[in-house]
Image (spheres, helix red, strand yellow):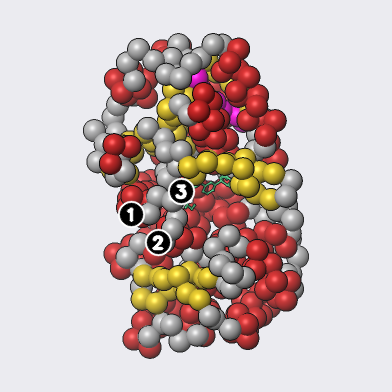
């Protein structure tokens, strides 16, 4: 039985995290007399073809496979999903299953949001990033040549089914990138989460299964709470973007190649912490505890050394900014951050120089 819920009144939904039930049983129970379609990608079909076949057989589900890669998170791929749903005569009562990482989840979620003006869908995340972040919260999207996630909709799933066992096949690079979205919760998820990450970081780096399950459980609860309080990001949901303003500038700097989003978020967290200390947002009493966590932030290899001035300029295209002014999520106490405006250019460029040229 699930113990985690995203509370959204009549749209409240459960998150199954390594509970005993099998996926087809959960689906048959939750959606009696419904037709199903499962969307996944070519890589997952290679790795989990037998399991996908078994699930599709049991649920009599239509299967649709998309190519693997962020470059396919675009309108043609979305149209391909809709074409299949229409060709197989699925209707408004159909339930779509997204089996994969954030790319499959975002695009299948957007197909569910738009097919027949919106049908039910379920997330089965298979990457660490998708388990702790993208499968929960109802942001669905595809990219446009003008930018990432520019076409999309808020459309909450009906349930999320997490099996941490899928992570055993995830490449290390993807695992450590996804770990950024766990680690960021040390800054926004309260003092207990700060202490948890500080203490269990070594085990999480070594992919210890117990530590990992607890980290996912804690991260999902934090995200579920924030989304319940601010579904459409008019306030505190922006906290989930801790480190992301710097990260987006970095990704943009490399034109989204040679760096994974999570890798950029690790650097972004180092910047946010440096800036908060420099701007005296962190009280002297907390500096020591932040030092301990600072030493644990990863610094993944970058394609080339970035220029601080370029990064500073790129920070201004962040979606959180209002009227051209930077809005940054910065830490104040262990586990607590707030949305901050009015940090001056001098401090930000000093941070960028310090973090990237040390
Ligand atoms: P991804 O979906 O591209 O997956 C990364 C790679 O791992 C892919 O090659 C994939 O095929 C492979 N893979 C997936 N599961 C695997 C497994 N169990 N074993 C082996 N390989 C596996 O990338 P991602 O990091 O999961 O997601 C990134 C996407 O998520 C971006 O498009 C981003 O915009 C989006 N995102 C959305 C939200 C949201 O709230 N909706 C939040 C964060 C990120
Ligand atoms: N990944 C940020 C959010 O879901 O709001």
As drawn, the label of residue 236 is: 2
Q: Magenta stretch: dominant SS?
A: strand
Q: Is mark 3 within 8 Å of ligand 1?
A: yes
Q: Which residues are magenta?
A: 36-43
Residue pointed to by mark 1: 229
> In the figure, residue 121 lies in which quadrant?
top left
Residue lying at 24% horizontally and 33% vertically, measured from the top left: 1
Whether residue 112 sits left or right of residue 219 in the image: it is: right
Disc 3 residue crowd, few under 14, some 14–19, many 20+, Cα 10 Å: many
Q: Residue at x 70, y 59 (%)?
A: 252
Q: Position of residue 61 (x, y in %)?
A: 48, 15
Answer whether residue 266 is visible to the viewer in this image.
no
Callout 3 secondary element: helix
Q: Mark 2 touching mark 1, by CB under 8 A? A: yes
Q: Position of residue 285 (x, y in %)?
A: 34, 86
Circle 2 packing at 10 Å, graded few (<14), some (14-19), many (20+), is: some
Task: Find the distance from the CA under tag 2 to the CA under tag 1.
Answer: 8 Å
Q: Nearer the viewer, mark 3 or mark 1?
A: 1
Residue 61 shown in magenta? no
Q: Earlier in the sequence, mark 3 or mark 1?
A: 3
For the point 39% across and 77% down, the residue is 332
Q: Would you say 216 lies left or right of 81 here?
A: left
In front: 16, or 121? 121
Please give left or right for residue 319 compared with residue 229 in the image.
Answer: right
Residue 312 at least partly seen: yes
Q: Nearer the viewer, residue 64 or 290?
A: 64
Disc 3 and disc 1 in contact, CB within 8 angstroms: no
> What x and y, as percent, mark residue 267?
58, 66
Q: Residue at x 75, y 65 (%)?
A: 304
The Cα–Cα distance between marks 3 and 2, rounded to whole angstroms, is 15 Å
Would you say 281 lies left or right of 191 here? right
Give the residue at mark 3: 133
């Amino acid at each position: 039985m699930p113990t985690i819920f995203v509370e959204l009144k009549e749209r409240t939904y459960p998150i199954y995290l390594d509970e005993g039930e099998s996926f087809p049983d959960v689906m048959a129970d939750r959606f009696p007399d419904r037709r199903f379609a499962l969307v996944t990608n070519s890589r997952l079909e290679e790795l989990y073809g037998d399991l996908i076949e078994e699930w599709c057989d049991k649920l009599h589900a239509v299967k649709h496979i998309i190519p693997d890669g962020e470059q396919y998170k675009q309108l043609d791929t979305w149209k391909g999903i809709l074409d299949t749903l229409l060709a197989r005569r699925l209707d408004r009562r159909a339930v779509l299953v997204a089996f994969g990482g954030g790319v499959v989840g975002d695009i299948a979620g957007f197909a569910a949001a738009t097919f027949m003006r919106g049908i039910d869908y379920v997330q089965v995340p298979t990457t660490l990033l998708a388990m702790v972040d993208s499968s929960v919260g109802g942001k669905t999207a595809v990219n446009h040549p003008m930018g990432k996630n520019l076409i999309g909709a808020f459309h909450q799933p009906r349930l999320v089914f997490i099996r941490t066992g899928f992570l055993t096949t995830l490449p290390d690079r993807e695992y450590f990138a996804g770990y950024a979205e766990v680690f960021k919760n040390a800054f926004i998820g309260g003092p207990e989460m700060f202490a948890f990450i500080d203490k269990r970081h070594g085990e999480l780096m070594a992919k210890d299964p117990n530590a990992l399950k607890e980290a996912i459980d804690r991260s999902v609860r934090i995200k579920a709470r924030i989304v319940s309080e601010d579904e459409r990001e008019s306030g505190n949901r922006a906290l989930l973007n801790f480190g992301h303003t710097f990260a987006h500038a970095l990704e943009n700097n490399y034109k989204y190649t040679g760096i994974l989003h999570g890798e950029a978020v690790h650097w972004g967290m180092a910047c946010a912490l440096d800036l908060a200390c420099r701007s005296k947002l962190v009280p002297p009493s907390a500096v020591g505890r932040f030092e301990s966590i600072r030493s644990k932030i990863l610094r993944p290899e970058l394609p080339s050394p970035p220029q601080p001035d370029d990064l500073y300029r790129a920070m201004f295209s962040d979606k959180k900014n209002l009227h051209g002014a930077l809005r940054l999520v910065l830490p104040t106490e262990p586990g607590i951050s707030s949305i901050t405006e009015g940090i001056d250019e001098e401090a930000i460029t000093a941070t960028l120089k310090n973090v990237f040229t040390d």
